[in-house]
Image (cartoon, rainbow, N blue to C red):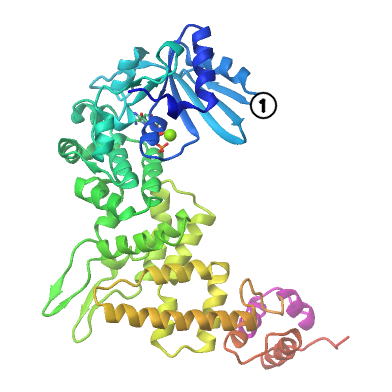
Amino acid sequence: MNLKDKLQNKIFSIVGQTADFHEVEVFVIGGWVRDIFLNRASDDIDFAVHGSGIELAKNVSKKFKGSKFSFFKNFGTAMVSAKIDGKEYKLEFVGTRKESYRRNSRKPIVEDGSIADDQNRRDFTINALAINLNSNHFGELIDPFNGIKDIENKIIRTPLEPAITFSDDPLRMVRAIRFACQLNFEIEENTFEALKSQNSRIEIVSQERITDEINKILMSKKPSKGFILLEKSGILKKILPELTELKGVETIGKDSHKDNFYHTLQVVDNISEHTENLWLRWAALLHDIAKPATKKYIKKVGWTFHGHEFFGAKMVPKIFLKMKLPSHEEMHYVEKLVNLHLRPISLVEDKVTDSAVRRLLFEAGNDIDDLMTLCHADITSKNEKKVNKFHKNFEIVKQKLIEIEEHDKLRNWQPPISGEIIIDTFNIRPSKEVGDIKNHIREAILDGKLENDFNSAYQFMLKIGNEMGLIAKKEK
Ligand code: ATP
Ligand code: MG
């Protein structure tokens, strides 16, 4: 097959000509080639060089004004970042190589090899496609494993025996699932069988590499597909057992609870239609994580999961630590959303009082919109009537939030009286009393008993202080 028309970007002719001049063979290979057949544009382009990848990259870099060149001598890889016709590209060059793995070591022996050797060490047939860029073979596709056919049939398959490909680098098992999920492909039967039988090997892979792939699954259009495959392969139990714990339905008498694993995945799919925020998607994945730990059957009431939002929030830091996810802002954000995820809907169940809405606005702060998105995604039921009712109530809460926010401006709100003012007014030291007075003022405003302005709050402070036996300094 000749693909000249796909290679019109001048990058390819320049790389090819530079390689000709230095008498090395060069191929564009991997994800970029796969993606042209999938009509996915990509600015990351990998080149395999039969010869020194670093040397070729250096010479290519000279052809693009303002480009940046960097390399890793130990890996024999080099990168060129360049702006070409107004677009940023990342070009990666690596020498074609042969990898052989020994039974007793995870580190392969890496030697120079042919393009065929290099294709053998790739993870999937669809990722092993290469196109020659030298002028005498420009545009010729090298597809030793029928990768094109697998793209057409939407199949993920390893180029060699799957047991060998997976045992050489067990991360490839998770990558198989990630690509199946991202591209909406199916994993070929033998490949999936090998994945199941080798699932415990995932334990030797570094957490960072696994988490990278999990994040890519979460950022797919329909993440549930990836998590279902992770579960079916037995890998999920090894890497995130808290999620597999959600599986299953228990029945006592006529009472069954829903399967919280599939419910969670439905919520993740729902939210993925509304946000590209990875952390909001994590919040959806973990929102019910403490349901197994809090599950109880109470006669005449049925199944309950009291406090699962609170215990769930407490589980978030442990899971983030284990997954090597960020431990600051992002983690606290997920904790907070898990903790508050029932609140908007509980507003519906009671009568929606202004003070309850005010309190929620105060606690959620800037994350109120994300919380509402999560809450909306959380409405899943087979019963259409129930879903409609929930959606209607949800709109009522949303409207109320808008009205109260407009009136009270509670987002990022700080009560009008600070600790310093209290200390100064009563001439006291920083102490528990100061905190008590501050809390009283905040609560009174949130309850709607006190106007949200300085003068009202100041008078209220004097009154509370007096009741506590404090004496205000003479007013200036
Ligand atoms: P994307 O970047 O869109 O996620 P990609 O296919 O480009 O997809 P990368 O992780 O960037 O994936 O890897 C580039 C290429 O390197 C792959 O297409 C594949 O040929 C090869 N590759 C990457 N990781 C592995 C691996 N663990 N084992 C074998 N080959 C791999
Ligand atoms: Mg890539």
Q: Disc 1 designates what residue?
A: 66
What residue range appears in magenta?
Answer: 419-441
Residue at point 60%, 29% (across, down): 82
Compared to residue 218, the image places residue 170 above or below, namely above
**Looking at the figure, which quarter contains the N terminus?**
top left
Q: Residue at x 15, y 36 (%)?
A: 190
82 sits left or right of 115 in the view: right
Give percent across and percent down for residue 11: 53, 24
Magenta-colored stretch includes residue 307: no
Query: Residue 221 or 122: which is nearer the viewer?
Result: 221
Q: Is residue 429 magenta?
A: yes
Quarter residue 88 falls in: top right
Residue drawn at (53%, 31%) of the image: 90
Overall secondary structure of the magenta section? helix
Residue at 24% x, 32% y: name it.
Answer: 149
Picture quadrant of residue 3:
top left
Q: Above or below — where is 173 with respect to 47?
A: below
Q: Is mark 1 within 8 Å of ligand 2?
A: no
Q: Position of residue 320 (x, y in %)?
A: 42, 52
Q: Is residue 124 visible?
A: no
Residue 229 in the image: state x and y as whole percent.
Answer: 24, 48
Does residue 348 appear in the picture of this structure? yes
| 431 versus 132 height, above or below | below
Q: Quadrant of ligand 2?
A: top left
Q: Amino acid at mark 1?
A: Gly
**Label 1 Cα crowd, 10 Å radius (few <14 / some 14-19 / many 20+):** few
Quadrant in the picture for the C terminus: bottom right
Q: What element does badge 1 sit on?
A: loop
Residue 230 picture location, percent across and down? 26, 48
